[in-house]
Amino acid sequence: MRIQPENGRVLVRAPNAGTFEIYRIESEEPLQFVSEQIGRFNEPLLLPPGQYLILADCSNETVVLRPGETRTLLAHQVLFNPPVAPEPEDSFSIQCNRFAKTKSRQHLLNRYSLNILHGTRDLLVGMVPLRVEFPEAAGASDPHILSYQLSGLRVEAYERMKPKTSFFVSPVEGLLSITENQVFGRWQFLLAGKYRIEVNGTRMEIELAEGQQQLIRPAFLRIGVSDAVNLHASSSILGTPLYVELNQGHWLDLNETYPVLPGEATLKLNGSLAEHRINLEEGLLTEKKVRSVLIDLDCSPWDWSCLGSREIFLYETDKPYPFAEGISDVPLLFFEEDAWVSIQGSRDLRYKIPDTVQDTNLKVGFVKLSPKQHHRPGQVTDLSRIEAPGFPLIGHSLDLSVDHDTLMPLIVGRYLLAQYQALATSDWERRANRLPFAVQAKEVVELSYPVYVTEKKYKQIREQQIKEQREQMERKYKLTQWRFRPIIPIAVE
């Protein structure tokens, strides 16, 4: 008859009540457990002899229990004291490795009291590493109580706040890149230190002292566009919505009010090439009114070859480079008070957008310019171009081609076809001729104008024209032959 060995006892002493887990280890290589039990602190647990793994909060210990032996371990109480009485919606987190061999981790939420086995333990307390060390003398005495004072951070709630409106917190110092979030109006409990707070693309850094209660009142930001602006045109034509970029990387919708953190910030509308600095004040609404200009080509809703087919540019007075770029048929948004608009194809002709008008809609027509080449000894056309007759238009187009027709988009209004002729006099006299014309919406104005070129240039142009006419006739002939080719019947057996 086999005699069962006498049981042993495991006693885990702790300053307070609670439970721990205990597993019997059958094998270490590979690691195998054969049983699991729940023990209670300060109460001996009767167990058969063998090797056991004891797991408490963020800690473990392996013991070998012999027959009739009592093994005593210490679990110390670690307290984290918030600066105010915590509510269920407040947030405090602890992460730690419980047992490395099984990759067992703990993520404790809103636990302010832990029972940790004696030794040195590494915890992540609210994103900040904390090493909990119990002195060696404590191992031979009674369990200890170790206390840490927490700090509190809260971004205040506000009226008509959307549910689950959150702020984000991350430590400034340290090698770990961790972020936690919390709802407005609720506490986030943290260890003392430097932290970065982020709300809707705005951020600020604060340093929390032990026990400090840090309250932050949000500011508010709204980028307003009038109801006259078609905000859906960009999505349907470009595939991307109109938006505003806050602090280089956070996108906000238009006509929405956002809570933000107080301080300086930058705004940039999509299409804009320049940033605008604003100051956000605690508890106050900063509202920026957006202006818009729409260059309307009067395209059919389904004509995708027309919709958005021209680039649009906005300039400030006397500035050579645009501050914003967009496309036709889509509203181009901007903040600037001083703005001139131009169109691809007639870019150096600029139209002044009225300073007092928030939304400007401009119709476009076209002019077809057909040069007629001539050669006259002693006379050469230096330059042909479209010029603005005066305010609200300024500038002129590029030099028109002397070889081919030019189709140019122009904002509805009056213009001048200007030509400059050089005459072979003793001092090469230069004369200017200007032909006024008007452009209407949905119309194409056709203008023919003489161009005087050198004899060599005239011959080159005529040869090219003859070549193009011949190629065109050959294409028409081949097309006619294809259309009227004979039909060969297929024999049926």
Image (spheres, helix red, strand yellow):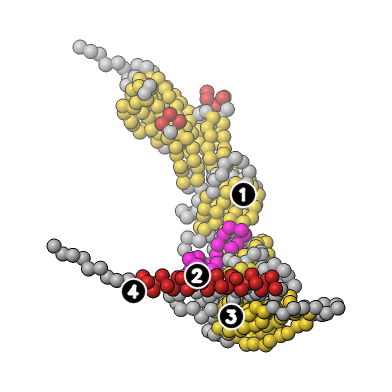
What is the x, y in percent for residue 420?
74, 79
Residue drawn where x is 60% and y is 71% of the image: 463
Query: Can you identify the residue that label 4 sits on?
Result: 484
Mark 3 crowdedness (10 Å alpha carbons): few <14, some 14-19, many ≥20: some
Q: Earlier in the sequence, mark 4 or mark 3?
A: 3
Q: Point out the stretch of residues depicted in magenta.
A: 233-257
Residue drawn where x is 69% and y is 78% of the image: 375
Q: In terms of image quadrants, where is residue 62?
A: top left
Q: Earlier in the sequence, mark 2 or mark 4?
A: 2
In front: label 3 or label 1 = 3
Mark 2 crowdedness (10 Å alpha carbons): few <14, some 14-19, many ≥20: few
Q: Is residue 221 visible?
A: no
Mark 4 crowdedness (10 Å alpha carbons): few <14, some 14-19, many ≥20: few
Query: Can you identify the residue that label 3 sits on?
Result: 368
Name the outermost residue toward the left.
Answer: 493
What is the x, y in percent for residue 165?
50, 61
Q: Amino acid at mark 4?
A: Phe
